Amino acid sequence: VYGYPALVMAINLRTKAKVKVLDESKIFVKSLNYGELVLDVRSSSFSGNRALLPAASVAKSILVEEDYSGGISIETYNEAPKSSGLGSSGSTFVSVARATYLALEKEPSYSELFEKAMIGEKMVHLNPSGVDVEIAIKGGLLKYIKGKGSEKVNLEYNLPLLVANSGYERNTGLMVKRFKESLESSAYMKNLLVYISKITEEVEKALRERNLKLAGVLLTANHLALSRFGVSNDRLDEIVGFCISSGAFS
């Protein structure tokens, strides 16, 4: 987000985590999408699918902080498709962190949840803004600025929103890296980021005023700007075009 505001909204696809405490100082993680992993709390050695290591690391940090000598078992289930840009990893780390705290009979604070979930996010996304973790904790519609936190955007109506899955899995960390490289390549790209931030402010205003037509136009402009950063693809562009031709606000 680079210090500029972003709008983020929770959708009705949830992540669930089930945690049980164990006497053995190991962390067992089981996921429908990624299989299984076993992490030794003391040596940090592991076996199984490395993709589950960030979730295990989130749990381990809590066990160490709470001075718990045993281990835990974790079962996770995510309703959102993986690697689809819907923040599934952030919501997974928040749910794992909260379930781990509760299994140790502690109600975590917001700051504890955010800090622990970000351990996993940094392992997956390299330099995340924290916006996915923030929305997973707080829900609703937020205006978020990295390093400054979030502000609730309260709407007096239910916002109609279509979420289309392209079916393409992609690496968010790679997208973040590509965006950064594009941003640093020229003054034009820096000006384009300022343009995107202005769009964000106008979208927030349009949503507050329930001007969905204008919001649609602005979001289409935002998509075109992001395409210039190389974080779109032909399939996404095709979906946007199909939605517009089918009557979506644009």
Image (cartoon, rainbow, N blue to C red):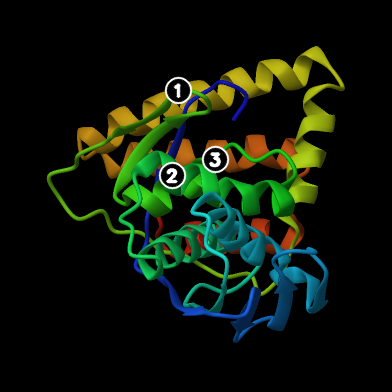
Image mark for residue 148? 1
Crowd band around label 2 with a 10 angstrom C-alpha radius: few (<14), some (14–19), many (20+): some
Crowd band around label 1 with a 10 angstrom C-alpha radius: few (<14), some (14–19), many (20+): few
Above or below, 52 relative to 10: below
Q: Name the residue that disc number 3 marks.
A: 130
Of the pair 129 and 233, the residue shown nearer to us: 129
Residue 34 x, y percent position in the rendering: 69, 81
Residue 76 x, y percent position in the rendering: 52, 78
Image mark for residue 112? 2
Q: Residue furthest top?
A: 187
Of circles 1 and 2, the one toward us is: 2
Residue type highlighted by circle 2: Glu
Label 2 residue SS: helix
Q: What residue is shown at x 56% (from left), y 37% (from top)?
A: 222
Label 3 residue SS: loop
Q: Earlier in the sequence, mark 1 or mark 3?
A: 3
Q: Are marks 1 and 3 in contact (CB under 8 Å)?
A: no
> Is residue 113 toward the left or the right of residue 73 in the image?
left
Of the pair 44 and 114, the residue shown nearer to us: 44
> Is residue 191 toward the left or the right of residue 249 in the image?
right
Above or below, 239 relative to 188: below
Count numbered badges in the picture. Answer: 3
